[in-house]
C-alpha cells in the first residue's frame, strides 16, 4: 500500500518527491473538530465540505489526495464515497478529530501524544470501508510533530507527509494570494497543501482554476501523491 513503512521504525517524514519530471501532488485536508461540529449543529456554518472543489477536479480529471479526519468522514459519508469512488483520488489519514499532538500548535485542541497511535489507527478503520485508493500516508494537524510523536506512530507503519507548498487557504479572504502562494513556490515533485473545508477555507474553489492554469503554463501536471513520491 502506498506510504507503508516497516512496523516498529520511526515514521519517516517527507515534504516532496524527486525534483525530476513534471508532476506535483495536490493534497486537500478535510479537517473536523468538535468545535466545527458544534458550529454545524448550531447553524453558524453551512458546510465543511467544498463540493465545488470536487466538481472542478472531477470535471478536469485532475488527480488529488485527500487527508481525511475520521470525524469529517463520519459527518460526510456520501462525500467520502464520492472521493473513494474516483480512481484519480487517493485517501489518506489526518487524525480522528484534528487535535494537535505537540504543544502550542496554533489554536488547535490538543491530545496527549500517548493517544496518538490509537487515534490514527481508529481513523484508518473509519476510512477503510470506503475502499478506493487507500494509503498509509498521514498528515499531522498544523504539521506539528516532534520525535515523540513520530515514535508513537512506529507501530502503524505510516509515512508522514508534510508538504513544501502551503497555500494558506484557511480563513483566507481573497483568492489571489492563494494562487501566488502556490505558483511562486511550486516545483517538480512539490506537495501542495490545500483544504476542502468550505466554511473555513472559502476561497479554495475560486483559487483552484487559476492554480491549475498556472501549473499548465509551467509544464507541471498534478498526479496522485503516491506517484509524485515514488523514488523519494
Image (cartoon, rainbow, N blue to C red):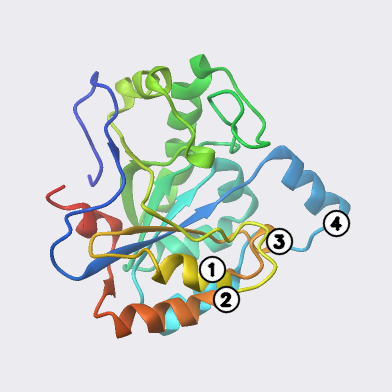
Res 121 → quadrant: top left
Distance from the alpha carbon under mark 4 to that under mark 3? 10 Å
Q: Secondary structure beneath disc 1?
A: helix
Query: Is tag 2's residue or tag 4's residue first in the polypeptide sequence?
Result: 4
| Direction from residue 196 to residue 129 in the image, left or right | left
- Name the residue carrying label 1: 178
Q: What percent of the width, then of the height, locates residue 80?
A: 51, 58
**Dot 2 and dot 1 residues touching (CB under 8 Å):** yes
Q: Is residue 5 above or below residue 216?
A: above
Labelled disc at residue 199: 3
Q: Secondary structure at mark 2?
A: helix
Q: Nearer the viewer, residue 230 or 169?
A: 169
Instruction: Give the mark nearest the N terminus, 1 or 3.
Output: 1
Mark carried by residue 44: 4
Disc nearer the start of the sequence (4/3): 4
- 27 lies left or right of 4: right
**Tag 3, which secondary structure?**
helix
Q: Whole-Å distance between the Cαs marked 1 and 4?
A: 25 Å
Q: Is residue 170 above or below residue 129?
A: below
Residue that label 2 marks:
176
Nearest to viewer (mark 2 / mark 3): 2
Amino acid at each position: 500500500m502506498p506510504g507503508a513503512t516497516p512496523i516498529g521504525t520511526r515514521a519517516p517524514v517527507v515534504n516532496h518527491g524527486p525534483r525530476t519530471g513534471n508532476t506535483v501532488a495536490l493534497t486537500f485536508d478535510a479537517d473536523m473538530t468538535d468545535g466545527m461540529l458544534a458550529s454545524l449543529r448550531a447553524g453558524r456554518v453551512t458546510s465543511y465540505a467544498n463540493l465545488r472543489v470536487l466538481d472542478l477536479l472531477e470535471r478536469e480529471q485532475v488527480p488529488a489526495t485527500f487527508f481525511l479526519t475520521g470525524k469529517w468522514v463520519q459527518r460526510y459519508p456520501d462525500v467520502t464515497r464520492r472521493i473513494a469512488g474516483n480512481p484519480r483520488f487517493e485517501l489518506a489519514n489526518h487524525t480522528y478529530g484534528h487535535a494537535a499532538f505537540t504543544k502550542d500548535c496554533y489554536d488547535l485542541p490538543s491530545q496527549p501524544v500517548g493517544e496518538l497511535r490509537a487515534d490514527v489507527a481508529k481513523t484508518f478503520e473509519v476510512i477503510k470501508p470506503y475502499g478506493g485508493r487507500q494509503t498509509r500516508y498521514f498528515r499531522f494537524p498544523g504539521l506539528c510533530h516532534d520525535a515523540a510523536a513520530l515514535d508513537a506512530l512506529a507501530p502503524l507503519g505510516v509515512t508522514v507527509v508534510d508538504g513544501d507548498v502551503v497555500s494558506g487557504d484557511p480563513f483566507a479572504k481573497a483568492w489571489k494570494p492563494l494562487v501566488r502562494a502556490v505558483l511562486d513556490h511550486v516545483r517538480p515533485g512539490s506537495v501542495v497543501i490545500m483544504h476542502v473545508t468550505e466554511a473555513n477555507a472559502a476561497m479554495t474553489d475560486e483559487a483552484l482554476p487559476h492554480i491549475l492554469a498556472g501549473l499548465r503554463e509551467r509544464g507541471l501536471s498534478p498526479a496522485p501523491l503516491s506517484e509524485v513520491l515514488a523514488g523519494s
